[in-house]
Amino acid sequence: DWTPNSFIESTIADLQEKIGNDKVVLGLSGGVDSTVAAVLLNKAIGKNLYCIFVDNGLLRKDEFEGVLKQYEGMGLNVKGVDSKQRFYDALAGISDPEKKRKAIGRVFIEVFDDEAHKIEDVKWLGQGTIYPDVIESVSVKGPSATIKSHHNVGGLPDFMKLKVVEPLRLLFKDEVRRVGKTLGISDELLGRHPFPGPGLAIRILGDITPEKVAILQQADKIYIDNLRSSGWYDKVWQAGAIYLPVQSVGVMGDERTYENVICLRAVESVDGMTADWSHLPYELLAKISNEIINNVKGINRVVYDISSKPPATIEWE
Ligand code: XMP
């Protein structure tokens, strides 16, 4: 019978036998899968696991610092790498969503490769791949897909030549969560909404600047904090704010303003393949809208997305 405890016990034994005294490098994303994979590997091989957590400048507000602290609190051997500027430089002037994804994937690979080179004699690449990623590898988005598409251009980055270890390869998401809970990972981390690899880059329509990222981060934080305090965070499958590069007229005191729009998105879903917009209470939406408009400079209008998937998608890009 499959139980989290039996899985953890046998996986740790397998990992120890397979890896021995070798070193493993693993990229943490702040998400459930990479975290659970890292904690399992840490139990198996301890300090021979080298975790890398990259700040791409496209995470939620304060997320990099907060999550890095949590990782350290779990006893992980983790290095936080501030690469914000490298990502912003690579994204400058790019508006096309797929070009954004490619640029982010490329820079991530470069940063990760640089860091992996600093670990002497590393033999393995640890990954948080789960079963749905394995069976749907064709449709998987994010770093792994980007890495695949890079196979064909200019050869493999060195870290891709490492042997791969994927302790969660046979698990479904709910099993990963149960394993994570048994390993003592916090409910807060395990219950997080999915967040796309390219992060806020695909929630800023059009080109990306650090200023737009800062505005979106503030609005998104107000939104998510209110979802949490109202009890709605755990009722929706995914939520986030989107920055629209559209200006509209508003009024503040005696002055007219001409500023940007924030769109709020929240959906109900099982697997992200189909989704319905969440029927958030009007009072909650009103409170969030007021807080955003009153506190976020550069925003004078908030709208709520009432589109379902299909035919809309969850993200706007
Ligand atoms: P869509 O917008 O296609 O999103 O309805 C479905 C789910 O996939 C996530 N998503 C991504 N995740 N890299 C990722 O890692 C991406 O490029 C990407 N695009 C969309 C989205 O957040 C939602 O959960």
Image: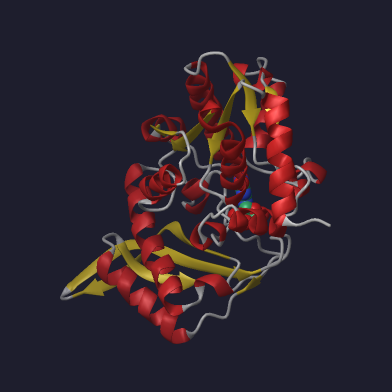
Image: 86 above or below 238: above
What color scheme is it? secondary structure
The one nearer the camera, 97 or 133, is 133
Q: Quadrant of residue 216?
A: bottom left
The percent coordinates of residue 107 (x first, y second) are 51, 28
The residue located at (46%, 85%) in the rendering is 282
Q: Using the rendered image of the protein, determine whether residue 166 is visible from the camera's viewpoint.
A: no
Q: Is residue 289 left or right of residue 239?
A: left
The residue located at (51%, 76%) in the rendering is 232
The residue located at (62%, 20%) in the rendering is 22
Q: Is residue 293 left or right of residue 33?
A: left
Image: 253 above or below 272: below
Q: Where is the N terminus found, in terms of image quarters?
A: bottom right
The percent coordinates of residue 233 (x first, y second) are 51, 71
Q: Residue furthest left?
A: 254
The percent coordinates of residue 18 (x first, y second) are 73, 26
Image: 35 above or below 188: above
Q: Using the rendered image of the protein, determine whether residue 4 is visible from the camera's viewpoint.
A: yes
The one nearer the camera, 122 or 43, is 43
The one nearer the camera, 236 or 189, is 189
